Amino acid sequence: MAGLSLQHPWAFAFGLLGNVISFMTFLAPIPTFYRIYKSKSTEGFQSVPYVVALFSAMLWIFYALIKSNETFLITINAAGCVIETIYIVMYFVYAPKKAKLFTAKIMLLLNVGVFGVILLLTLLLFKGGKRVVMLGWICVGFSISVFVAPLSIMRRVIQTKSVEYMPFSLSLSLTLSAVVWFLYGLLIKDKYVALPNVLGFIFGVVQMVLYVLYMNKTPVAVAEGKNAGGKLPSAADEHVVVNIAKLSPVLPERSSGVHRATQMAVAAVPTRSCAAEAAAPAMLPSRDVVDVFVSRQGPAVHVA
């Protein structure tokens, strides 16, 4: 196996170093999940990045097994599968019901459906070298899409002038990982390993440059649903204000109109019901304006 052969000492060195750096990168979300464990809530964090990381690890393990001489890819991606699975299980434990259902659907679609289709098609329709080529390009395409994903984070940094969601240590580790795996791919003459890491290196450098530019900036508020701190709303309840003006029992038609309006917001008014108030008009000659807050659960958004 070329990756472990001492006849390729540099390939061995870069493969081992790539395993170490990538392993540390897999462990980077530990503070996030410790926070989730302490608060017993996912706090708006999405599961999609961890589901995608698990799918990527599964795909590269399949490629390494088909090619049969990519031991270092097997070891690091096997570790990645274990770590990402732990993250996803923790997410299922502490996430709200809607987030759990969404995560289950994504896993069934991606990790079962898409991976199963790729496995069957490559095994049934291609043989020998063609199978490796087809699977290699699938891995390249998916890896490029994963590397493009941080564009949304970089856009958020530019808009909010805040690097809160783009820590320098993570950007640095991703850049180093891309460099090491690119060199490993060159040394073992595997273009499918080397190519996507060129883009990974470019995006990593851009992230570090953005961090240096904005690390001392004062965060600004941004529209489009973001709060004053520049953060996206994190699965918090969204409040809709219903203004009920001047309830008066003098006119029956107005009372009935108000009754219909308050029926829509009855869960938000814990005091006396409209029926009870209508039954005692003498006791309540008039009422001031009432602001009824109707809670509506917003969708979870990714803040990692």
Image: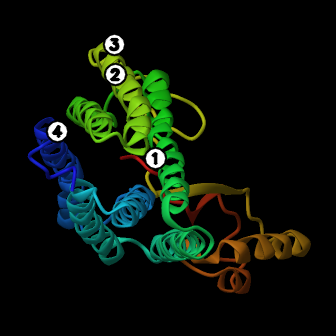
Of circles 4 and 1, the one toward us is 4
Residue 86 relative to residue 158: left or right: left
Q: Amino acid at mark 2?
A: Val
Residue ID for mark 2: 205
At x 42%, y 73%, the residue is 96
Residue at horizontal 40 percent and vertical 29 percent from the top: 198
Q: Which mark is residue 143?
A: 1
Sort mark 2 into few (<14), some (14-19) or many (20+) by Cα contacts within 10 Å.
Answer: some
Q: Between marks 2 and 3, how big is the CA–CA gap?
A: 12 Å
Question: How much space separates mark 2 and mark 1, taking CA atoms?
Answer: 17 Å
Mark 4 to mark 1: distance in Å?
A: 19 Å
- Report the residue at 53% width, 76% height from top: 116
Q: Nearer the viewer, residue 104 or 157?
A: 104
Q: Earlier in the sequence, mark 1 or mark 3?
A: 1
> Can you identify the residue that label 3 sits on?
213
| Side (left or right) of 123 relative to 161 | right
Label 1 is placed on what type of residue?
A: Ser
Q: Give the foreground label among 1 and 3.
A: 1
Instruction: Determine which of the numbered discs, if any, sits on residue 14 in the image.
Output: 4
The alpha-carbon separation of the residues under discs 4 and 3 comes to 31 Å
